Image (tube, rainbow, N blue to C red):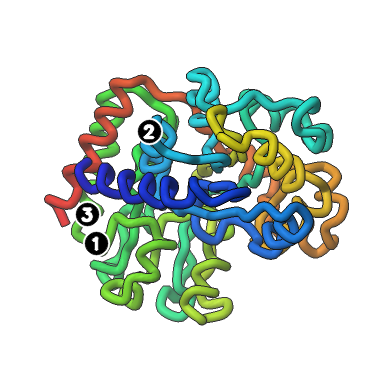
């Protein structure tokens, strides 16, 4: 936890440093998770700059959001965090009166953001792999959790208390939202067995930029769309690929939210509305090779994109997928304790 606290303090320092700049909005977001051209267009129209501050885990993001001294104006959260921080009053309530573009989003998507954000992007969790090294594409979570000997010290996992458990729990045929300690301990057994093959527990988009480990990562836990970012960062077009395991997976939704205590809330709401508009949402989805939740934006996408199963998963995959639900406090604590011990088994 000391590492996360240090990261949180660093992010807070960056946010505080930009707070004094007139007409600047601070956006807390994953790296490479929005098309910079869209933000540039917004700035050219309004004169308002957008400063991106990156996080590489949901836990780190939530620590920054919980810090009363941070200066965040907008944030991308998972649907669970949108619900949690919405209830706590950290996130501004949004509807069509303050974010008109919400009219283009079905109520099912809007409910998943709990009225505290705009449905931003959605997708699945799966296995990323280097096709030039891994000759047999992975088809099961077994390929990641019980990797072949050739993958020893070539696997990248993820230390978020939600996502880290998706693979082992799916492999066990259990709910990814389980609060049952015995089930989590069974998942821990699988994670311990896998640990000697794991090179890093840092999110793949971050670890691929670390020269000390990047060339040795052949397989990783990640999200749909990450393969495009990996290929861009590694300068290897098409080498990194993505597979959804046959057992099913996490079907996730990210929400873009305005922080209630933002000192520039009206501008932040206007930016949120701009990002949710059909043209912006479609351009963003195209640039990131990811699916949009906007009905109007979807209609603007080329047919080849709408028919691409790597972007819009087939119905049979979605039928086997699970959504994240809020976990009990005890479950979160146990999951974090388990994650904190995994390095001991590498």
Q: Residue sitting at 26 percent across and 24 percent down? A: 181
Q: Quadrant of the N terminus?
A: top left
Q: Secondary structure at mark 2?
A: loop
Q: How far apart, in angstroms, are the residues tagged by discs 2 and 3?
A: 33 Å
Give residue 47's position: percent from left, percent from top.
71, 55
At horizontal 50% and vertical 26% (from top left) the residue drawn is: 90
Residue in view at x 50 percent, y 40 percent? 72
Asked if the residue under mark 3 is in contact with the one under mark 2, i.e. CB atoms within 8 Å, the reply is no
Q: Which residue is mark 2?
A: 67
Q: Position of residue 323 (x, y in %)?
A: 55, 33
Check the image and report above or below for 117 versus 32: above
Q: Position of residue 247 (x, y in %)?
A: 49, 45
Residue 206 seen from this side: yes
Q: Which residue is mark 1?
A: 197
SS class, disc 1? helix
Sequence-wise, the earlier of marks 2 and 1 is: 2
Neighbor class of circle 3 (other Cα within 10 Å; few <14, some 14-19, many 20+) is: many
Residue 263 shown left or right of residue 279 in the figure: left
The correct choice, above or below, for 117 with respect to 296 in the image is above
Cβ atoms under marks 1 and 3 closer than 8 Å: yes
Q: Which residue is mark 3?
A: 195
Mark 2 or mark 1, whichever is nearer to me: 2
Q: Quadrant of residue 103?
A: top right
Quadrant location of the C terminus?
A: bottom left
Quadrant hosting residue 168: top left
C-alpha distance separating marks 1 and 3: 5 Å
């Amino acid at each position: 936890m000391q590492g996360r606290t240090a990261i949180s303090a660093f992010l807070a320092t960056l946010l505080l440093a930009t707070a004094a700049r007139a007409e600047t909005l601070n956006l807390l977001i994953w790296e490479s998770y929005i098309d910079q051209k869209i933000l540039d267009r917004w700035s050219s129209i309004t004169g308002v700059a957008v400063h991106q501050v990156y996080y590489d885990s949901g836990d780190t993001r939530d620590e920054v959001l919980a810090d009363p001294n941070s200066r965040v104006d907008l944030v991308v959260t998972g649907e669970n965090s949108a619900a949690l921080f919405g209830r706590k009053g950290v996130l501004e309530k949004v509807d069509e009166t303050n974010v008109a573009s919400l009219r283009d989003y079905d109520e099912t998507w809007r409910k998943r953001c709990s009225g505290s954000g705009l449905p931003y992007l959605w997708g699945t969790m799966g296995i990323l792999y280097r096709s030039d090294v891994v000759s047999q594409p992975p088809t099961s979570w077994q390929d990641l959790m019980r990797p072949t000997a050739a993958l020893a010290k070539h696997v990248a996992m993820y230390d978020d208390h939600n996502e880290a458990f998706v693979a082992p729990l799916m492999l066990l045929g259990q709910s990814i939202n389980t609060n049952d300690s015995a089930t989590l301990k069974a998942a821990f057994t699988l994670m311990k067995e896998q640990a000697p093959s794991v090179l890093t527990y840092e999110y793949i988009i971050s670890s691929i930029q670390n020269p000390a480990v990047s060339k040795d990562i052949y397989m990783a836990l990640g999200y749909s769309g990450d393969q495009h970012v990996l290929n861009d960062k590694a300068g290897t077009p098409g080498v990194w690929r993505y597979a959804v395991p046959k057992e099913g997976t996490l079907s996730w939704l990210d929400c873009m939210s305005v922080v209630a205590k933002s000192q520039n809330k009206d501008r932040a709401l206007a930016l949120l509305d701009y990002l949710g508009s059909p043209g912006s949402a479609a351009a963003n989805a195209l640039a990131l090779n990811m699916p949009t939740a906007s009905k109007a934006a979807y209609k603007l996408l080329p047919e080849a994109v709408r028919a691409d199963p790597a972007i819009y998963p087939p119905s049979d995959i979605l039928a086997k997928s699970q959504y994240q639900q809020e976990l009990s406090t005890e479950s979160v604590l146990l999951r974090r304790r388990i994650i904190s011990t995994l390095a001991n088994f590498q």
